[in-house]
Amino acid sequence: MSTALPGDDQMRQEAQARARIDQELRTRFAPEDDALRGANDRAQAEGLPAIQISPIQGKLLQVLAIACGARKILEIGSLAGYSGVWLARALPSDGRLITLEVSAKHAAVVRQTFQNANVADRASVRVGPALELLPALIPEAPFDLIFIDADKGNYPHYLDWAIRLGRPGTIIVADNVIRGGRAFQVPPPDESAAGASAYNNKVLADQRLVSVAIPIDDRGMDGFAISVIR
Ligand code: SAM
């Protein structure tokens, strides 16, 4: 008699096991405090979409920032400041996080989040379309870590700016580069997949970068591209 489980049961059990593992990893490696939970609560109360990174992604950003000795961090796409808090907490007391956000409403929530997390001394938000704000950052470069998490269609342009505002050793992280596999379809089926696809192709073709992509969202369907400037 076969002991193999029917396909549906096996898939359900695997999904449950993955959820348990994810929960264990979050609890052990990336516990949230009141300030982080508050960022998401405030976002929900203000009607912002729940599209922030996961706690494990936040912790990975911290690990990367500390690994490269980051003193200056740039983020493109702030939402409510959740990822900003993870990043700002990786900085020394005289470090600096600048996060760019197109929505004035989102930026107001970000400022409150930074106050509540006691990182407002080192973290600030600038309001406007990122491509218009980025040129003003040239005098503040180089940044040690740059996190890209905004409109996917502009990801290739954000990569150009990240390289320009970085230095050898700068780490560039971009979220949402897998899109449930849609980023690998030819042609990509939607605008965000097209942006992610173009970003992936660009980092892979650029000899100045060493890059990897990892699935790291809750369901393993989306994730980070991580590049370092040689
Ligand atoms: N990094 C945030 C986190 O994990 O907590 C999530 C950022 S959310 C995915 C994307 C944000 O980018 C939104 O708040 C959106 O308003 C902003 N955004 C979209 N297009 C933008 C643009 N052209 N310039 C700056 N920000 C933009």
Image (spheres, rainbow, N blue to C red):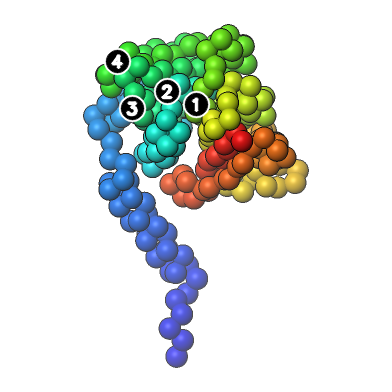
Identify residue type, mark 1: Asp
- Say what secondary structure mark 1 lies in: loop
Identify residue type, mark 4: Gln
Q: Nearer the viewer, residue 144 or 124?
A: 144
Single out the mark in the foreground, 4 or 3: 3
Question: What is the distance, in whole Å, between disc 1 and disc 3 at their CAs?
Answer: 15 Å
Residue 71 image label? 2
Residue at (45, 90) in percent of width and height: 1
Local crowd size for mark 2, using a 10 Å CA cut-off: few (<14), some (14–19), many (≥20) = many
Single out the mark in the foreground, 3 or 2: 2
Is 65 rendered above or below residue 121?
below
Question: What is the distance, in whole Å, between disc 1 and disc 2 at their CAs?
Answer: 7 Å
Whether pointer 2 and pointer 4 mark residues with C-beta atoms closer than 8 Å, the reply is no
The answer, for residue 122, to whether it is visible in the render is yes
Single out the mark in the foreground, 1 or 3: 1
Return the x and y of residue 97 as percentages of the image width and height: 43, 19
- The residue lying furthest to the left in this view is 34
Q: Earlier in the sequence, mark 1 or mark 2?
A: 2
Identify residue type, mark 3: Arg
Residue 115 image label? 4
